[in-house]
Image (cartoon, rainbow, N blue to C red):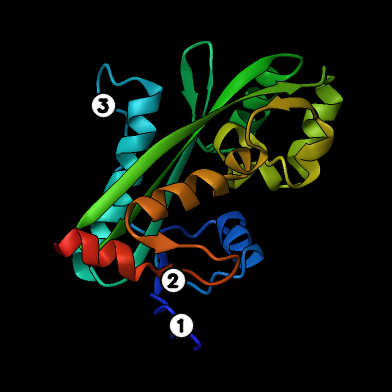
Amino acid sequence: MTRPAAPTPRVILASQSPRRRDLLTMLRIPHEVRPADVDESVWPGEAPVPHCERLARAKAARLSAADPEAVVVAADTIVVVDGDILGKPRDRAEAEAMVARLAGRTHTVHTAVAVAHRGRTAAGVETVAVTFRPLTAAQVAAYVDTGEPMDKAGAYGIQGYGAVIVERIDGDFFAVMGLPLGRMVGLLAELGVAYPFGALALDASAASREGA
């Protein structure tokens, strides 16, 4: 006897990042994009890991409150070097300064992912060490000329031109892109949402256990 197909929830990506959208598309997870507008300022004394997890949770909560039946996926990525959080550069000069600061050194990328569904939220942070190749001032300027750094934390993207300035990474490549897929799938499972290598599906047995 054929088992009925598990219901497929609507998925909302709480981000306008084309990289995160590409990653969900790669997994063949249909989704809609609804960026969450939250204040991304760092609180006084706030450490990097709690900071990015707080933002991911806030983005998920903002959209899930209005649409609790949807599965909301939110994320936040920060680049940290010398204890400083490097956000998106405000202008070309800041982009060059960021890339030059990272050149020839190892820095840390923290990406938090939060998923929300039916009033519940699960979140976690993936931490990756990234090492840049040494770069001359001319190479830094040429990379910034591509325009790629301007909308990215730390002023680089590992999936684009930035791939040639990265010497190595220790950790989840997809976390550096902005969405740690393995961790995301694990968090979804905590909420009773399965990923059977295709569109997400609600786990009926998990839902029944939750209501018991």
What's the residue at 43%, 85% (across, down)? 4
State whether residue 97 appears in this view.
Answer: yes
Residue 117 placement (x, y as % from top left): 28, 62
What's the residue at 55%, 69% (across, down)? 29
Q: How many angstroms separate mark 1 from mark 3 (CA)? A: 45 Å
Identity, as a three-letter code, of the amino acid under mark 2: Ala
**Residue, far bottom:** 1
Residue 9 placement (x, y as % from top left): 38, 75
Q: Which is more toward the observer, 108 or 208?
A: 208
How crowded pointer 2 is (Cα within 10 Å; few <14, some 14-19, many 20+) is rated as some
Q: How many angstroms separate mark 2 from mark 1 (CA)? A: 9 Å
Pointer 3: what residue? 43
Pointer 2: what residue? 201
Identity, as a three-letter code, of the amino acid under mark 1: Ala
**Residue, far left:** 212
- Which of pointers 2 and 1 lies earlier in the amino acid sequence? 1
Residue 159 placement (x, y as % from top left): 73, 46
SS assignment at label 2: strand
SS assignment at label 3: loop
Q: Report the mark closest to the observer, 2 or 3.
A: 2
State whether residue 37 appears in this view.
Answer: no
